[in-house]
Image (cartoon, helix red, strand yellow):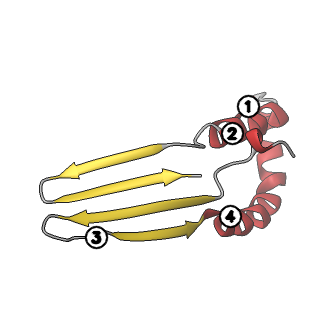
Amino acid sequence: MKPEILPPLTATVRVRRAGWRHGVRLWLPLFLIWLLLVPLLILLLPLLFVGALIFGINLWRSLKALNGVLAATHGTHVEVDRGDTKFFIRLH
């Protein structure tokens, strides 16, 4: 699988409060969430197929588009400054 079509596999979250020398940095393994969601998607696939038939939607194109949206979040960097606390989130 090409790396540009994979959803983000890890996230780094950093919290820094005013007066702290160093912030708290957390590494979140998002690939574990994806591993938990794949069996759920497999179980829901028949329902998605029936819904696609009812509403006339191409299921394969919809799943590819969803994967494209998830893959586009690679490299997202969010900074939130809320007074005395700063949050940094980065998707890898």
Q: Check whether the beta carbons of the residues at disc 2 and disc 4 lie within 8 A of each other.
A: no
Residue neighbourhood size for the residue with mark 4, other residues' Cα within 10 Å, grouped as few (<14), some (14–19), many (≥20): some
Q: Check whether the beta carbons of the residues at disc 3 and disc 2 lie within 8 A of each other.
A: no
The residue lying toward the viewer, choosing from 92 and 66, is: 92
Q: Residue at x 70, y 35 (%)?
A: 68
Inspect the image, locate mark 1, and give the three-letter code of the amino acid beneath it.
Answer: Phe
For disc 1, the marked residue is 55
Looking at the rendered structure, the secondary structure element under dot 1 is helix
- Identify the disc placed on residue 22: 3
Residue neighbourhood size for the residue with mark 2, other residues' Cα within 10 Å, grouped as few (<14), some (14–19), many (≥20): few
What's the CA distance linking mark 4 and mark 3? Answer: 27 Å
Q: Residue at x 54, y 51 (%)?
A: 91
For disc 2, the marked residue is 66
For disc 4, the marked residue is 31
Residue neighbourhood size for the residue with mark 1, other residues' Cα within 10 Å, grouped as few (<14), some (14–19), many (≥20): few
Inspect the image, locate mark 4, and give the three-letter code of the amino acid beneath it.
Answer: Phe
Residue neighbourhood size for the residue with mark 3, other residues' Cα within 10 Å, grouped as few (<14), some (14–19), many (≥20): few
Q: Position of residue 19 (x, y in %)?
A: 13, 69
